[in-house]
Image (cartoon, rainbow, N blue to C red):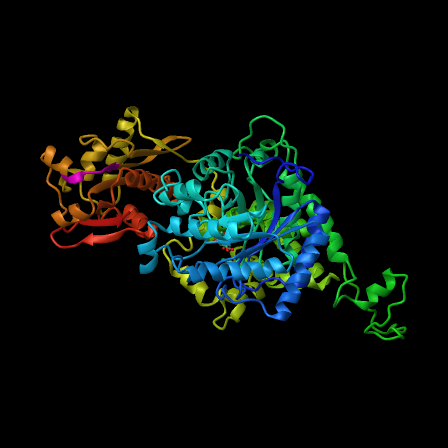
């Protein structure tokens, strides 16, 4: 069942490892010219597959039943034959899931008719996609099929057999990643049915643990393979950017150990919507596919260079950027500068836009503008600024760290009258880094290959402005007056001084501000870990609870506070439910905890404790949790992680509602729960004046 390693294609030999690109994103599809360019590159880099699945192409998804017109047919035929010429397998995908009625035989007939038409264009490989659709079946289908999976599998098998069991036939399930599996990967009735009933010649697409997976581990693939009863083809969204118009991904293919290769049927990357900037995404995937998989055990959590002897993301990136630089400097492009073309080519151009007599400035006249050439360092910086969905590149991280340091060590923050020499030196370095971004922008916008530039333009403009704002801000922190500060403080800002439009305003108003903890983590010098509670932690927890209950100017003396069930839980008078107690630790020891009682009412009754919550709260939110953090935990991200883990365990214990009791004087915890955003105030009536009750349904 496990797929072979990448190997030379041999007719009649073992089935090949599918490696290439899926055009599977939302938004403007690529042009036929771009797709043909893609096939050339794929061939050059050793990739062998292209999956045609542009979400917003009318006849791929919304009007899937409609046949192609003569003109469209001609274009598709040309495309399929271009793929063939470049040894690329063209897989035609169709997404009927928006409105198909599985039980109506006319629908299967419509699918067959459409795919027969495409077969007539020379295509031999096909795919049915059921991603991103409603999971509720219509009344007619409910009558005919016992489940959604059965309906999909029936129609897929029928179409596959109709097409004569093509060598390559892919199926994308509706539960296409761990996160979508209900209730979990190993218990998903949907996927178990797919695994059992989908004909064995059909391969299954899978995006990994999440839609956009940070890591894909060997273990996770072994798990899904055992459910699906076949090795999946990874549909990798690592470089997809259709979900955020401010981001594009120019970092290397990463965090997928090459040990995966023998465990998979293939890998297809669904990259950025912009065609030309995908050079790095596709080039590095090709390097990964070619990598040597011999070697001992590796761990994706290990540091980058040691994690995978067969593949180094950094080396693959440098290789890709070196080749990409040549592409940028290629003057033989539509819209490229004729002047350069003339200088670099021996051939006389048939026609140039400067005509025969190219302008030569006379003495005392303006010299011709000569652009500084783009460098490899520029491209490295560009890639660092637009790296990967879960990671910024090294320079971007340094810039964030430096800005954070400058902010927290400024005059205003330290109440000093002057900034120190160190502050000034670091502010200067930060300014230099910002200047490098501006210079990179200038050289990029003068590069001869306009097609790549235009695809990148909005992004580089955006980062240039963002960097400009940060630069001006640092100047004001250092006490600069004049233009820099005026730019930030003016009453009449220009529109580029408040970025992001309405969506930006919404984000700034949300409690977690888009939950950017990911990028704050590298700024922290403290390393926190969350681990299960053990009996030796009891004393520490009691200590933290007492300390926090008594801390704060406006807190009543401990003895005067009304006892809460949470106090008994923290004091150890009530024991937390099994697998429902976690502690947070830093280098100095335990600094926080999260404990839960999954049946709080029963525990209260058993110990004769008075509870402040009403019976209706108990009925809907049976589980009590209590969380506490020492003041040295200033970043709430690790605590958020801890509570996330606790809620997961509570949920897997079968509990569907959680509440917590909070004292109004405990502002920190009130702030924490409010910031989490998901906890709502449950009960006001009948509570002591000092107490609030918040809860969440799981
Ligand atoms: C998805 C969609 C894909 C989209 C991607 C990133 C799959 C199977 N489907 O869920 O079309 O481009 O997310 O937004 O990945």
**Residue 415 in view in this figure:** no
Position in image of residue 643 (x %, y %) = 33, 41
Q: Nearer the viewer, residue 433 or 484?
A: 433
Q: Quadrant of residue 295?
A: top right
Q: Is residue 427 left or right of residue 445?
A: left
Q: Is residue 235 left or right of residue 534?
A: right
Q: Nearer the viewer, residue 20 or 698?
A: 20
Q: Quadrant of residue 459?
A: bottom right
Question: Residue at image x 15%, y 42%?
Answer: 561
Magenta-highlighted residues: 596-601
Is 210 located above or below residue 81 in the figure? above
Question: Residue at image x 29%, y 24%?
Answer: 536
Which residue is situated farthest in the left direction here? 608
Position in image of residue 182 (x %, y %) = 35, 45
Position in image of residue 296 (x %, y %) = 59, 25
Is 650 located above or below residue 409 in the figure? above
Can residue 599 be found in the magenta stretch? Answer: yes
Position in image of residue 474 (x %, y %) = 54, 56
Can residue 359 be found in the magenta stretch? Answer: no
Q: Nearer the viewer, residue 155 or 547?
A: 155
Which residue is situated farthest in the top direction here? 536
Q: Is residue 30 left or right of residue 154?
A: right
């Amino acid at each position: 069942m496990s797929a072979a390693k990448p190997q030379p294609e041999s007719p009649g030999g073992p089935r090949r490892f599918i490696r290439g690109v899926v055009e599977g994103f939302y938004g403007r599809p690529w042009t036929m010219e771009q797709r043909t360019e893609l096939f050339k590159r794929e061939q050059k880099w050793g990739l062998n597959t292209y999956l045609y699945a542009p979400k917003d192409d009318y006849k791929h998804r919304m009007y899937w039943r409609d046949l192609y017109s003569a003109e469209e047919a001609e274009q598709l035929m040309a495309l399929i034959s271009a793929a063939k010429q470049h040894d690329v397998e063209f897989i035609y995908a169709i997404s009927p899931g928006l409105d198909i009625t599985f039980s109506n035989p006319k629908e299967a007939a419509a699918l067959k008719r459409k795919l027969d038409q495409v077969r007539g264009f020379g295509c031999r490989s096909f795919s049915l996609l059921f991603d991103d659709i409603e999971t509720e079946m219509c009344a007619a289908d409910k009558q005919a099929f016992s489940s959604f999976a059965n309906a999909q599998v029936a129609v897929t098998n029928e179409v596959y057999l109709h097409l004569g069991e093509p060598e390559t036939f892919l199926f994308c399930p509706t539960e296409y990643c761990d996160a979508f599996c209900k209730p979990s990967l190993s218990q998903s009735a949907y996927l178990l049915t797919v695994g059992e009933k989908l004909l064995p010649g059909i391969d299954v697409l899978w995006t990994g643990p999440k839609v956009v997976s940070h890591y894909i581990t060997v273990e996770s693939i072994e798990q899904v393979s055992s459910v699906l009863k076949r090795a999946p083809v990874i549909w990798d969204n690592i470089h997809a950017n259709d979900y955020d118009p401010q981001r594009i991904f120019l970092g290397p293919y990463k965090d997928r150990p090459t040990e995966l290769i023998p465990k998979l049927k293939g890998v297809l990357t669904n990259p950025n919507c912009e065609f030309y900037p995908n050079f790095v995404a596709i080039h590095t995937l090709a390097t990964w596919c070619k990598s040597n998989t011999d070697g001992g055990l590796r761990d994706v959590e290990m540091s980058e260079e040691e994690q995978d002897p067969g593949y180094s993301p950094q080396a693959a990136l440098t290789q890709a950027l070196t080749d990409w630089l040549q592409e940028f400097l290629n003057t033989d492009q539509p819209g490229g500068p004729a002047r350069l073309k003339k200088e670099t080519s021996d051939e006389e151009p048939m026609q140039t836009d400067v005509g025969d007599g190219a302008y030569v400035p006379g003495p005392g006249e303006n010299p011709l503008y000569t652009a500084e050439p783009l460098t490899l360092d520029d491209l490295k910086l560009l890639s660092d600024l637009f790296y990967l969905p879960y990671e910024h590149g090294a320079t971007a991280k340094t810039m964030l760290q430096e800005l954070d340091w400058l902010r927290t060590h400024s005059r205003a923050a330290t109440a000093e009258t002057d900034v120190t020499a160190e502050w000034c030196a670091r502010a200067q370095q930060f300014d230099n880094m910002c200047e490098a971004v501006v210079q990179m922008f200038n050289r990029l916008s003068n590069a001869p290959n306009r097609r790549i530039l235009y695809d990148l333009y909005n992004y580089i403009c955006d980062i240039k402005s963002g960097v400009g704002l940060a630069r001006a801000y640092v100047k004001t922190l250092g006490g600069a007056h004049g233009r820099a500060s005026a730019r930030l403080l003016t009453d009449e800002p220009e529109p580029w001084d408040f970025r992001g439009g309405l969506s930006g305003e919404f984000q700034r108003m949300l409690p977690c501000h888009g939950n950017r903890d990911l990028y704050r983590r590298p700024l922290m010098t403290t390393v926190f870990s969350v681990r299960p509670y053990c009996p030796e932690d009891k004393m520490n927890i009691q200590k933290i609870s007492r300390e926090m209950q008594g801390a704060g100017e406006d807190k009543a003396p401990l003895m005067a506070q009304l006892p809460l069930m949470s106090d008994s839980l923290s004091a150890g008078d009530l024991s937390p439910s099994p697998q429902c107690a976690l502690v947070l630790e830093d280098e100095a020891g335990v600094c926080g905890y999260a404990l839960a009682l999954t049946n709080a009412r029963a525990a209260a009754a058993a110990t004769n404790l008075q509870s402040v919550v009403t019976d209706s709260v108990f009925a809907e939110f049976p589980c009590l949790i209590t969380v506490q953090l020492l003041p040295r935990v200033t970043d709430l991200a690790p605590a958020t992680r801890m509570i996330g883990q606790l809620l997961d365990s509570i949920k897997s214990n079968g509990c569907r509602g959680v509440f917590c009791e909070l004292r109004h004087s405990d502002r920190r915890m009130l702030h924490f729960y409010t910031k989490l955003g998901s906890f709502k105030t449950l009960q006001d009536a009948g509570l002591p004046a000092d107490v609030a009750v918040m809860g969440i349904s799981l």
